[in-house]
Amino acid sequence: MKKIALIPGDGIGPEIIEAAVRVLDAVGRFEYVTCYAGGSAIDRFDDPLPETELEKMKACDAVLMGALGGPKWDNLPGGKRPEAGLLRLRKGLNVFANLRPVKIYPALKEASPLKNSVIGDGIDIMIVRELIGGIYFGRRQEGDEVAYDTLEYSADEVRRINEVACRLAGMRRGVVTSVDKANVLASSRLWRKATVAFYENHPEITLNHLYVDNAAMQLVVNPRQFDVIVTGNMFGDILSDEASVITGSIGMLPSASVGYPGEIALYEPIHGSAPDIAGKGIANPIATILSAALMLRFSFDMNDEADRIEAAVEAVLNKGLRTADLGGGEASLKTAEMTEAILSELK
């Protein structure tokens, strides 16, 4: 039986994790281990990621996380904040590639801020973000007058993230767009050089390059040109959040953070902990449920079960069922009601 580490986390995290577990139990049998990270770990252990909790996660087959952080912990020193625990979690699990699928469901086209002429028949992008290098993990200094953060990449780090992007592109339309700032940054010039060298051995993949500012514009002007986008940590963080908005709601999008094949992976919705609605039972559980489907697909080779969950979500949306963030208005479903609707489709 597969063992899943659950990190309910903060804010709406426990509510959406509960929903995902109910859906997982409808398609298989799993063992669950509850772990703490982020604000809940600070409250319990005075540490955003105790080593004991990380070791519990490493003993499992995959990790499913809700959301971390909130204003309650905003005034703590940098190394004590929930975000520090998240960075340590990614590094500790060695999940160097963050996969963020960006898909517009036909039933939600009207919820997108983009015109139908831009969306066309639909948008289906996979953003591959390098996750444990770059400026978020570089040398830094804090100060009142001078501060700095160092953006650094090695050719090996660039090659391994492109291995993931290349593998995914081979299962999709075969086009990779590498995003950098090679006209300004030395680290980006190395990124581009190493990327070009990598794809010389993969002629079956079409490689394109964009500067990050142009890529940000192209995502809203002509998003259908993209298949797989590969980029560094900070650029990927910004671009994937921008891309999430074009789907109509950030509450719809899952993510997977993976390392080398066969190693443990981390799955989570891309949205935050939404402390303003925590405990009200109105959070959209779909992104977390779809993250669980990614876990079945990528970590457990349970493709049929993943297909069933994704089809159930689409069927519910096609029936016009909506949570508040999807514009449901007075007819908005609560978290438990949306979960029940998905479970009904699974049955």
Image: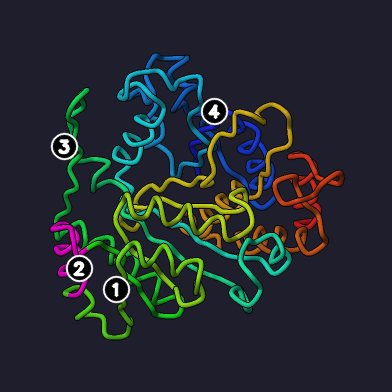
User: The magenta stretch spans which residues?
Assistant: 182-196
**Mark 3 vs mark 4, CA separation in Å:** 29 Å
For badge 2, the amino acid type reads Arg
Q: Could you tell me if the residues under marks 2 and 1 are in contact, i.e. CB atoms within 8 Å?
A: yes
Where residue 244 sits: x, y (%)? 53, 56
Within-10-Å neighbours for mark 1: few <14, some 14–19, many 20+: some
Q: Which residue is tagged 1?
A: 209
Q: Is residue 306 magenta?
A: no
Within-10-Å neighbours for mark 4: few <14, some 14–19, many 20+: many
**Mark 2 vs mark 1, CA separation in Å:** 8 Å
**Mark 4 vs mark 1, CA separation in Å:** 38 Å
Residue at disc 3, secondary structure: loop
Q: Could you tell me if the residues under marks 1 and 3 are in contact, i.e. CB atoms within 8 Å?
A: no
Horizontal arrangement in the rendering, residue 278 relative to residue 267 (left or right): right
For badge 1, the amino acid type reads His
Horizontal arrangement in the rendering, residue 231 relative to residue 143 (left or right): right
Residue at disc 4, secondary structure: loop
Residue 164 sits in quarter: bottom left
Where residue 27 sits: x, y (%)? 67, 52
User: Which of the marked residues, 2 or 4, is nearer the chain's N terminus?
Assistant: 4
For badge 3, the amino acid type reads Arg
User: Which of the marked residues, 1 or 3, is nearer the chain's N terminus?
Assistant: 3
Q: Could you tell me if the residues under marks 3 and 4 are in contact, i.e. CB atoms within 8 Å?
A: no
* Residue extending furthest toward the front: 145
Label ID, residue 139: 3
Q: Which residue is tagged 2?
A: 192
**Mark 2 vs mark 3, CA separation in Å:** 22 Å
Residue 214 sits in quarter: bottom left
User: Which of the marked residues, 2 or 1, is nearer the chain's N terminus?
Assistant: 2
